Amino acid sequence: MVNRENFNFADLENWLNEQRVTEIECLVPDLTGVARGKILPREKFTEDRGMRLPEAVVAMGVTGEFPEEGPYYDVISPTDRDMHLQPDPTTARIVPWATDPTAQVIHDCYDKDNKLVPFAPRSVLRRVCDLYAAKGWKPVVAPELEFYLVARNTDPDMPLKPPIGRSGRAETSRQAYSIDAVNEFDPLFEDVYAYCEKMGLNVDTLIHEVGAGQMEINFFHDHPLGLADEVFLFKRTVREAALRHDMYATFMAKPIAGEPGSAMHIHQSVVDAVTGDNIFSNPDGTPSKAFYWFIGGLQRYIPAAMALFAPYVNSYRRLARFTAAPINIQWGTDNRTVGIRSPLASKQARRIENRVIGADANPYVALAATMACGYLGITQQIEPTPECKGDAYLGDFQLPRSLGEALALLRAETNLHDVLGASFITVYTEVKEIEYAEFMKVISPWEREHLLLHV
């Protein structure tokens, strides 16, 4: 991994030569978090090449469909114009599973006037980070990413099942924090850690989560853009490693009925750019007003941001009572039943954990959105509700229950539009409406089982 301050394209060229790279994967994260782009021979990867892609490439849904008409084309030209891709040299990493020496470099998207394309996910996160910088703040985040290992499944009509471990058996019960259950997949995780080391991914601990075959990886805290890049690359890495061990890794929010869903919990704090002090703490170590206002902003805006945190119809299956997932926006200290948790921590490490976000969320979009909620909370001085000190699962639902409801809330919340960018919200909601309409064409087994002969 390249991790040098002010690292430029000339430095990148030297690094590529040192690594004897023969191919470059030029990557752009799209709205869903899928890696789009081109693969170039090393000699074609030059600073003045001007690599281009149609701008709609980063603005399509998970089905690959586009709206046929409507506000989408107020933002994206119907003439299918190009955007110019510029590599971010600090993101350069070796592709450890490639046969030939191959590098991957994440690119930013620019228009003909050399301005960031505002609806590209990486641009949205950069926009929010710039808002913090303008206030003299540095946001710090640490994602915790859950995922399932499942047996190969080539028939989408068949339910997913836990994979066979080295014992020759699949898990049949929940094994939260079990070391032996993780060891069942030692060969896979040895590859994962080896790949991560070669790529310089900033991963911390690996644990077995509650579900059968469910794992969690934690990342060290850092700047949001760098960590979004790492989550984006980590998802590619785990999927690739799993395939090499005859199984799938999935980041679906709710892949298996009857098992807990997968989240991407994000720990957040904000430090003063000059002093480095955590603005969530007063000098005497007590929580500051900014701490409470940040929580207030999350409470106020999370419902409207749910289409960004829970981006698919499947996402809302995870958010059910008593399934290790929040159903409301209560907050509490060291309380895992709430949507907004404050872990026990020292004065400098005081932070806020957003537990609402699903593992299926685009990391760039999710980080931008949760930081936007907190930013609005501080700048608008939004007071939170009283702390929840009991079981929040017993409380009322305070989150939208479907993607359709969530999209309506996002469209109506203009304060989020101002922070994230109105053009991004337009493109995102229009694409998600297409996905939702596609899903509504599907008749599920539940409907055939319970409605076919009974209604």
Image (cartoon, rainbow, N blue to C red):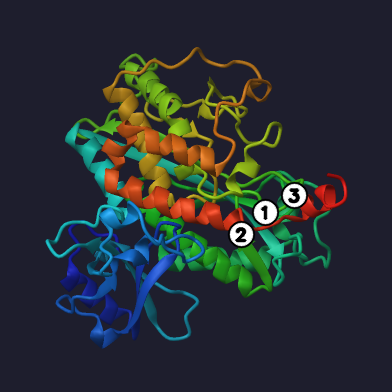
Q: Nearer the viewer, mark 2 or mark 1?
A: 1
Circle 2 sits in a helix, a strand or a loop, which is it? strand
Residue 74 in picture, x, y percent from top left: 27, 54
Task: Count neighbours of disc 3 (C-alpha within 10 A) and say few if under 14, some if 14 to 19, many if 20 or more.
Answer: few
Q: Residue at x 77, y 50 (%)?
A: 447
The amino acid on which the numbered mark 3 sits, given as a three-letter code, is Ala
Which residue in the rendered view is the most extreme toward the left? 113
Q: Quadrant of residue 37?
A: bottom left
Task: Count neighbours of disc 1 (C-alpha within 10 A) and say few if under 14, some if 14 to 19, many if 20 or more.
Answer: many
Q: Quadrant of residue 135?
A: top left
Q: CA distance from mark 3 to mark 2?
A: 14 Å
Residue 263 in picture, x, y percent from top left: 57, 44
Q: Nearer the viewer, residue 279 or 75?
A: 75
Q: Residue at x 44, y 58 (%)?
A: 33
Q: Does 221 sit above or below residue 172?
A: above
Do the residues bearing badges 3 and 1 touch, measured as CB atoms within 8 Å? no
Task: Count neighbours of disc 2 (C-alpha within 10 A) and say few if under 14, some if 14 to 19, many if 20 or more.
Answer: many
Which residue in the rendered view is the most extreme toward the right? 453
Q: Residue at x 41, y 35 (%)?
A: 268
Q: Is residue 238 left or right of residue 122?
A: right
Q: Which mark is residue 362?
A: none
The amino acid on which the numbered mark 1 sits, given as a three-letter code, is Pro
The residue that label 2 is drawn on is 250
Q: Nearer the viewer, residue 308 or 332?
A: 308
The residue that label 3 is drawn on is 257
Residue 95 in picture, x, y percent from top left: 43, 74
Q: Is residue 405 left or right of residue 410?
A: right
Circle 3 sits in a helix, a strand or a loop, which is it? loop
Q: Quadrant of residue 248?
A: bottom right
Do the residues bearing badges 2 and 1 touch, measured as CB atoms within 8 Å? yes
Circle 1 sits in a helix, a strand or a loop, which is it? loop
Q: Nearer the viewer, residue 438 or 30?
A: 438
